[in-house]
Image (cartoon, rainbow, N blue to C red):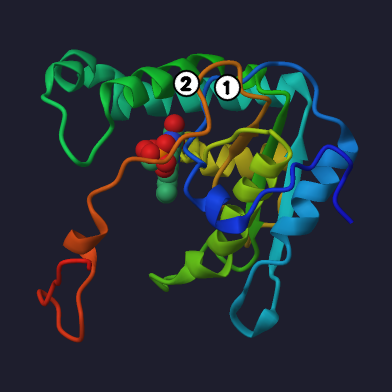
Amino acid sequence: MPAPEAEPLPVLEALHSTPARRYLSPEPIPDEVIWAILDAAVRGPTGGNVQGWGWVVVTDPAVKQQVAGWYLEGWNRAYGSRRDEILAAPPGPDGLSRPSFLAAEHLAHHIAEAPVWIFPVLRHAAAARSPRLGSSIYGAVQQLILAARAHGVGTTLTTLYSGHEDEVRELLGLPEDALTMGLLPLGYPARGRWAQPKRRPVEEVVHWDQWGATRPRP
Ligand SMILES: Cc1cc2nc3c(=O)[nH]c(=O)nc-3n(C[C@H](O)[C@H](O)[C@H](O)COP(=O)(O)O)c2cc1C
């Protein structure tokens, strides 16, 4: 049963109106909403329905502060150090737009303020070599993002903390074989709106029978 705050929202409408939300209010999210979001997430698929996952909910400010420092370090290395160059680049059909860059920069400095964090964790993944490893959790992660949206809660899949995976594993008390597959900071949006994510046109990226055989969309 959905928690009372859930907005009735057609699936296709949700799919077309759920961008990354990175300006998040510190307003608390009720536990029953978190439960409802996670109950929707775990309906997602895993190979053989093995469900070798765990979902670590973090609200402890001390844990968040520690990881936030690692996240900011990752941000500075990957993007912050190229700030001027990225902001000067002409807008294109892919890559981070200027508003997205500024939002991601904001999140990098304020991620600890998001009231609830969720780490999707996959067992037996730390030493795995399959390039398809993530397929047994990212479907569920997207369900989490869409369920959150139905409850008016924004989030973004993030990974910039992951240069410190071993320290995060220890901090969260994860089993040795487990790997965090992301960090989703959740919060009620403080800025921005639910709008269609910008993408390259579907006709450019769909191939019919053979790679390269694109078609105009009728
Ligand atoms: C594997 C993966 C890692 C990501 N890592 C981060 C991250 O560390 N920080 C962040 O702000 N966004 C992160 N994102 C979010 C992407 O930047 C976002 O999905 C993309 O810019 C599209 O955003 P939009 O849906 O709002 O258009 C990540 C997304 C994916 C799929």
- Considering depth in this image, is 24 or 130 the residue closer to the camera? 24
Depicted 151 relative to depicted 66: above or below? below
Q: Is residue 89 visible?
A: yes
**Pointer 1: what residue?**
111
Tell me if I can see residue 179 in this picture.
Answer: no
**Where does residue 96 sit, x and y in percent of width and height?**
28, 32
Q: Amino acid at mark 1?
A: Ile
Horizontally, residue 213 falls left or right of residue 133, namely left
**Residue at disc 1, CB closer than 8 Å to ligand 1:** no
The quadrant in which residue 92 appears is top left
Instruction: Tell me if 120 is positioned left or right of 213 in this view.
Output: right
Q: Are marks 1 and 2 in contact (CB under 8 Å)?
A: yes
Q: Residue 108 — which label?
A: 2
- Name above or below for residue 57 compared with residue 79: below
Q: Amino acid at mark 2?
A: Ala
Point 18% across, 13% down: residue:
84
| Image point (53%, 37%), residue name | 156
Q: Residue at x 64, y 85 (%)?
A: 48
As measured in the structure, the alpha-carbon distance from the residue carrying label 1 to the one carrying label 2 is 6 Å
| Residue situated furthest front in the rendering | 218
Find out if the beta carbon at label 2 lies less than 8 Å from the nearest ligand 1 atom.
yes
Closer to the camera in the image, 164 or 116: 116
Disc 1 element: helix
Quarter in which the C terminus is drawn: bottom left
